[in-house]
Amino acid sequence: MDSPMCLVENADGELHVVPGAIKYLMGLNQKVIVVAVVGLYRTGKSYLMNKLAGKRKGFALGATIQSKTKGIWMWCVPHPEKRDHTLVLLDTEGLGDVEKGDSKNDAWIFSLAILLSSTLVYNSRGTIDNQAVENLQYVSELTERIKVNSSSAASSSHDDEEGGDAQFVQFFPNFVWAIRDFTLLLEIDGRNVTEDEYLEHSLELRKGGGKKNLMYNLPRECIRNYFPSRKCFVFPTPTTPAKMPHLDSMDEADLCGTFRKVADTFCRFIFQESRTKTVKGGHKVTGRMLGHLINTYVETIAKGSVPCLENAVLAMAQIENQAAVDEGLAVYQRGMEEVKALFPVDMGQISAHHLCSDHQATQAFMKRSFKDENGDFLKALAVAIAKHYADLLIQNEDASEKKCASLLEKLSAPMAQKIKEGIYATPGGYELYCNHHDNMVAQYRAEPDKGVRAEEILEQFLKEKSLEKNSILQADKKLTENEKKIHEEKERSAVLEQEKKAAEEKRLEMERTMEDDRRSKDEKLKQMEEKMKEEMKQQERDFHRALECKMQEQKDLLEKGHKEKADLMRQEIEEFKKSNTPEKEGGGFLESTVMPVLRLGLDAANTFFQYKLMRGAFMK
């Protein structure tokens, strides 16, 4: 993407997605790391985003007191350190714009930034004083504007979320506070401190009750609870006040050296520490998936409802999983085109191509699908592949029948001409006919690549020719009646032997088809089990990360003497543990519940059944 584009338009207080931006995301299959910047208008947010993009210009900076950015603007650039990732930069409309005067609209912009990002940068100016913290008032409203579980999406009660704030910690972005135009010394009580220590000091809670302390603590508690991973950067003024309006046109060398150093450190931190965007369940998000999420969230807000992480993931899963089925089937079909061009082929050839293409199709499905908890979409793919394979088996049979019938017609043409000429209607003609007949069959058998119906078509041919052969036998005056009976018995034995060969040919074909089904099913089960185990490991990692954050927060509260708040935190942690026990979804759960259900579904999706069904319908 050469330049930023509007992602979410904010017109007259209403939010709308921009189709062109969504279309761009839908074509982006790489995983994404999403960095969003929020903060008061005219505080230099756009400059930070341009810096992360590695460009001097891009997001509009503006040089007046009016807010320049409206809605949410997006810039997708290659990640400078992770080649298989795209860095998605989101520059949001400035909060607190006096021309807009709508705090509710600001709150939704802020909520969207949190829902979409993996790192949230809060940009402010001056110092972290009480006013700067209170400007983050939207944090205290998050439980009213974002729900984790569908069961509580219709309610505004914070208590409806089992595990409280810890539920949010699992899915919320890292938090970075960027303080611009900082002119003070980083000292507390005469002691030098780091930027992070300065931030933590600013977020310390006051002891005691009373309305004043409650109001003071509320935004700080929310920041501490929702964003346990916190980082702070203090930026000095980049240049003289007179030059500030021309910041976007200034060379880097003309900026303050200390400012450049902090800006470079900030960028390195974002590049190295920002995680891949994930959703509930630990699933890593691609650009395409991010597009689905944005559509879902903005549509929900437009309807006056509360965005729900679980519902958004389920809606996205339905779309992505169906697309994964279509993609998997397309991979299979492309893989089978090569062998289809060679029809007719023997069962070994088509089987080998089928298993290879089926494996590649399942891999493609697994790569794109997620949250296919009952394996319904994998079963749909298995059914679609089984139908296509059954159809190819029939096409291969038909090609084999056509080739074999044509070959026999060609090989038997000279004998038909001799019958017309009466060459076999003489004493000894039967023996001559038999010699020519045996030679013709030998030529037929020697012909390569006849396909899977070679013996069956030969059987039909021999039965058709048996009357002709018997007529020549009975007309041969050279043979005695006893010799004719011996030849008749020999002919019956030959026909019976050929019936056995044709039946064996069919049996081997069916056995191979059923073996293909078994191997295909086992492969799908194996890949699904591996995928589900990895997804559960990711969920467990998210769970433990959130748990560690909350336990550290409880420890800090105890150390600062906030015993009552620490006790409440402990209760919340216990609730969180009860509602998120990873061992419930370990290997035993997979083996006892998910895999048997999936196995039954795949059993019903076998090629043998599809083949018999389609063959029966075809023959009608």
Image (cartoon, rainbow, N blue to C red):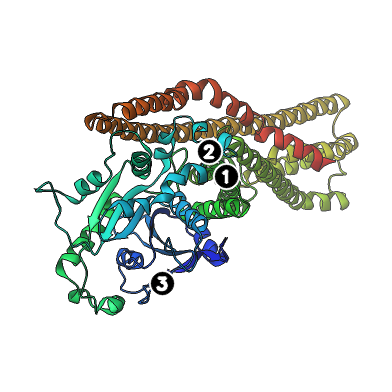
Q: Which residue is mark 3?
A: 2
Check whether the beta carbons of the residues at disc 1 and disc 2 lie within 8 A of each other: yes
Give percent across and percent down for residue 587: 45, 23
Specify whether 300 is left or right of 273. Answer: right
Specify whether 328 is left or right of 171. Answer: right
- Amino acid carrying label 3: it is Asp
Residue 356 visible in this rendered orientation of the protein: no
Q: Quadrant of the rendered structure where residue 442 is?
A: top right
26 over 464 or under it: above or below: below
Nearer to me, 136 or 194: 136
Nearer to me, 271 or 610: 271
* Callout 1 crowding tier (Cα within 10 Å): few <14, some 14–19, many ≥20: many
- Amino acid carrying label 1: it is Asn
Residue 208 visible in this rendered orientation of the protein: yes
Element marked by disc 2: loop
Q: Which residue is mark 2?
A: 371
Specify whether 588 is left or right of 504. Answer: left
Element marked by disc 1: helix
Specify whether 399 is left or right of 574. Answer: right
- Residue 321's label in the rendered image is 1
Q: Quadrant of the rendered structure where residue 185 is?
A: bottom left
* Callout 3 crowding tier (Cα within 10 Å): few <14, some 14–19, many ≥20: few
Residue pictured at 40% horizontal, 38% vertical = 170
Element marked by disc 3: loop
Give percent across and percent down for residue 538: 40, 36
Give percent across and percent down for residue 324: 56, 47
607 over 105 or under it: above or below: above
Among numbered discs 1 and 2, the one appearing first in the sequence = 1
Give percent across and percent down for residue 369: 53, 43
